[in-house]
Amino acid sequence: MSLKLRSILFFTALVLVFQGCSYRPLGKTGLLSELNAISIPVVVNKESRADAEGVMTQALKNEFVRYIAVTGEDKADAILYGVIEEYETRPSAYTLERVVAEYRLSVNMSFKLISAATGDLIWSDKVVRDYEDYPVDEANALNTVEAEREALRVLAAKISREVFYRMAITQAEGDKEK
């Protein structure tokens, strides 16, 4: 069999294999497909970390605005409420001298999506958890504090993507019948 014929057969096989595996960005899929606008009020912070709620709220808005209008409650189809249930830092790595080299920031959140018109629960998730490690600067504690802030920003973006993804893959009531 010639090289040209093998190449044609190979690419034909690839086309046939991947024909059913079409890529489609999440966008407004799942239960989000029925919403035109969403409101995201300030996240409730049950922990004592200052401004964790502000960082998380902004990250949620930044994620959702890419796919759906983020508005005030008066113009929204649904309201996404978030709660920081746990915010914890603990050592995750040590030097040979047994000095902390890295901390792990872990955040656990819960979410509810409520219909703005009826107040009915559309979707909820009680456990959305993730973590991010950040370095310790023994020489300058302010650098460690800033590293924790940056870890929180990264973690907030990761959790926001996860919440969006979970909502996007959840079927809306009308889609379940199809």
Image (spheres, helix red, strand yellow):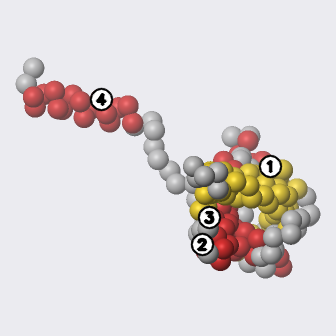
The local secondary structure at tag 1 comes to: strand
Q: Residue 163: horizontal and vertical position, in percent?
A: 70, 56
Q: Earlier in the sequence, mark 4 or mark 2?
A: 4
Q: CA distance from mark 4 to mark 1?
A: 42 Å
Count neighbours of disc 3 (C-alpha within 10 A) and say few if under 14, some if 14 to 19, many if 20 or more.
many
Figure quadrant of the N terminus: top left
Q: Earlier in the sequence, mark 4 or mark 3?
A: 4
Badge 3 amino acid = Val
The local secondary structure at tag 4 comes to: helix
Q: CA distance from mark 1 to mark 3?
A: 28 Å
Discs 3/2, front: 2
Give the answer, above or below, for where 147 lies relative to 132. below
The residue shown at (69%, 40%) is 178
Discs 4/3, front: 3
Badge 2 amino acid = Ala
Badge 4 amino acid = Ala
Count neighbours of disc 2 (C-alpha within 10 A) and say few if under 14, some if 14 to 19, many if 20 or more.
few
Is 113 on the left or on the right of 168, as rendered? right
Q: In the rendered image, which residue does mark 3 sit on?
A: 136
Discs 4/1, front: 1
Circle number at residue 112: none
Badge 1 amino acid = Val
Nearest the viewer among 82 and 53 is 53
Q: In the rendered image, which residue does mark 1 sit on?
A: 127
Q: CA distance from mark 3 to mark 2?
A: 9 Å
Q: Are marks 4 and 1 in contact (CB under 8 Å)?
A: no
Nearest the viewer among 75 and 144 is 144
Is 4 on the left or on the right of 93, as rendered? left
Q: Are marks 3 and 2 in contact (CB under 8 Å)?
A: no
Q: In the rendered image, which residue does mark 2 sit on?
A: 139
